[in-house]
Image: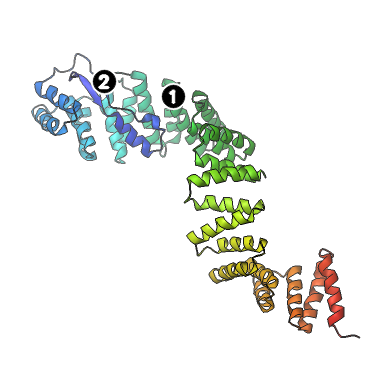
Amino acid sequence: MRSVRQFRVAIFLIAIFLSALSLAQSSGQTVRHHKVAETESPASPELTKAESAIEKKDYSTAEPLLKQIVEASPKNYLAWFDLGFIYNTQGDTQQSIDAYRKSVEAKPDVFESNLNLGLMLAKAGQPDSEKYLLAATALKPTAHIEEGQARAWMSLGHVMETSNPAGAIDAYQKASALQPKDPEPLLSAGVLLEKQNQLGEAERSYKAALALAPDSGDAMTALANLYMRSKRFPEAQDVLRKLVVLHPDDSAAQMQLGRILAASGQKDEAIAQLEAASKRRPQDLDLHRDLAQLYLDAGKTPEAEAEYQTLVAAQPNDAQLHFALGQTMLKQRKFPEAQQEFVKVITIKPDYGEAYGELAVTANEAKNYPMVIKALDARAKLLPEIPVGYFLRATAYDHLRDAKNASANYHKFLEVADGKFPDQEWQAKHRLIAIEPKK
C-alpha cells in the first residue's frame, strides 16, 4: 500500500472539466499520487486504513474513517483532501468543494489542494475558481513538477477565456513553455487568438502544434478552418487533402474538402469527397443538400433527383427542396412529375416567384396552356416580366386560338427581345403574319 504521506490528486477532474471546455483529449489521465514531504504530520492508523480503502475504491469504508479523523483533527488537510476526492467520485460536487476548501484552509501552500479546488469550483461555475487555480500556478507540485504546473496554467487559461482573453492566452503560452513538446497548449492558444482576430499569431500557434504532432487532426482542422476564414482556399485545400489521407474516417474533413473543391470547380473530386462524407453522416441534411446541388451542377441529374427525393421526404414542407427536385425532373423531361413539384412549391410558398416561371415552362412542355398563362400572370405580380415570359404567354394563347392576346404578347416579346432570341423572334414574326388581320 502507498504511504499516507502521498497525495491523491484527482487528475480525472481535469478531464471532466476540460472536456466541457473542448480541450484536446490528452488532458484525460489516470489518477496520480504525489508524495508529501517527510516533515508533514505523521500518519494515523485510521488515515492509513482509509487510504488503503481508497486504493481499492472501497469508498464506503474510507469515508466514515476520514470523517472520524476530521472530527477529531479539523486541520488534517490530508483527510479533507481525501474526502474531497471521494465526494467527487460520488458526484457530490458541493461536498467535494467544501472538503477541498477546508484542506486549503488547513494548509494553503499545497499545489494539489488548490488545483483540485479550483477545478471543482470551475466545474460548478463558481467565480472564485480562478483564485485557486492562479494560486496553484505559484506552487510546486509534489511530483511531475513541470507537468503539474503546465496543467494548472492550462486550467487557468480555460477559466479565463471569457473574462480575460489576454490572460488566458498568456496562461496557455506559459503552459507551452513548461511542456514544449505538448501541442495542446499551442492549439488552445491558437483557438483563442483566432477568436481575438489575431489571425497571424493563431496561424503560427497552429503550425507550431502541427510541427509537434504532424498527424494531429485537431491541428490540421484548426489550420484549415483559419485558411478558409481568411479565404486562402488553396492552402486550406492542401491541409485538408493531407488530413483526409491521414484520417480517412474524418467525415467533417471530407465534407470541408468537398465544398472547397466544388467552389474551385473541381466537381468530380468534390463529389467523391462529399459522397464519402455522406456515407458516414446519413442524417446530415445540409451535406446532402450540397451533394444534390453538386450533382445537379455536374449534370448528374438522376443522382441529384435521388438526393432531393430523400431530402423532401425528410423535410416535406421545404419549398426550396421541392423547387430543386422539380428542376431535376424538368432537366430529365419528366414534365408531369416536375409540374407536380412546382405546384407543391407554390402551395407551400405562394410568393415564390421563380417557381411560377418554372411551372409555366413545365406546363408548356406538357401542353397545359391554360396553366402556362395562369402561372405567368401570377409570376408577373411578384417579379418583373422577362422576354421568355411574353413568348411563352403568346404561344399559349396561340395554341388556344386566342389571336388577340397572342398577337399582343408576340409584339411585347419582340419589343424587348433585342436580338437575343433569334429563333423565337423569327417564330414570333411569322406567327404575327399568320394571325393578324391583313391590312
Seen in the picture, residue 108 relative to 261 is either above or below; the reply is above
Q: Residue 33 falls in which quadrant of the image? A: top left
Left or right, 319 with respect to 169, comes to right
Give left or right: position of 202 versus 368: left
- Within-10-Å neighbours for mark 2: few <14, some 14–19, many 20+: some
Distance from Cα at disc 1 to Cα at disc 2: 22 Å
Q: Position of residue 180 (x, y in %)?
A: 45, 21
- Depth check, front residue: 411 or 317: 317
Q: Position of residue 265 (x, y in %)?
A: 67, 45
Q: What amino acid type should be assigned to the residue bearing mark 2? A: His
Q: Secondary structure at mark 1?
A: loop
Is there a contact, CB below 8 Å, between mark 1 and mark 2? no
Q: Is residue 38 toward the left or the right of residue 119 in the image?
A: left
Describe residue 157's horizontal placement relative to residue 141 as left or right.
right
Quadrant assignment, res 309: bottom right
Residue count near mark 1 (Cα–Cα under 10 Å), binned few <14, some 14–19, many ≥20: some
Question: Total label count?
Answer: 2
Residue 19 picture location, percent across and down: 37, 37
Taking depth in this image into account, of 329 and 432 the one nearest to the observer is: 329
Type of amino acid at the residue the image marks with label 1 = Asp
Display colour scheme: rainbow
* Disc ID at residue 34: 2
Q: Tag 2's secondary structure?
A: strand
Q: Is residue 193 above or below residue 285?
A: above
The N terminus lies in quadrant: top left
**Where is mark 1, residue-wise?**
182
Q: Position of residue 75 (x, y in %)?
A: 15, 26
The residue shown at (33%, 19%) is 144
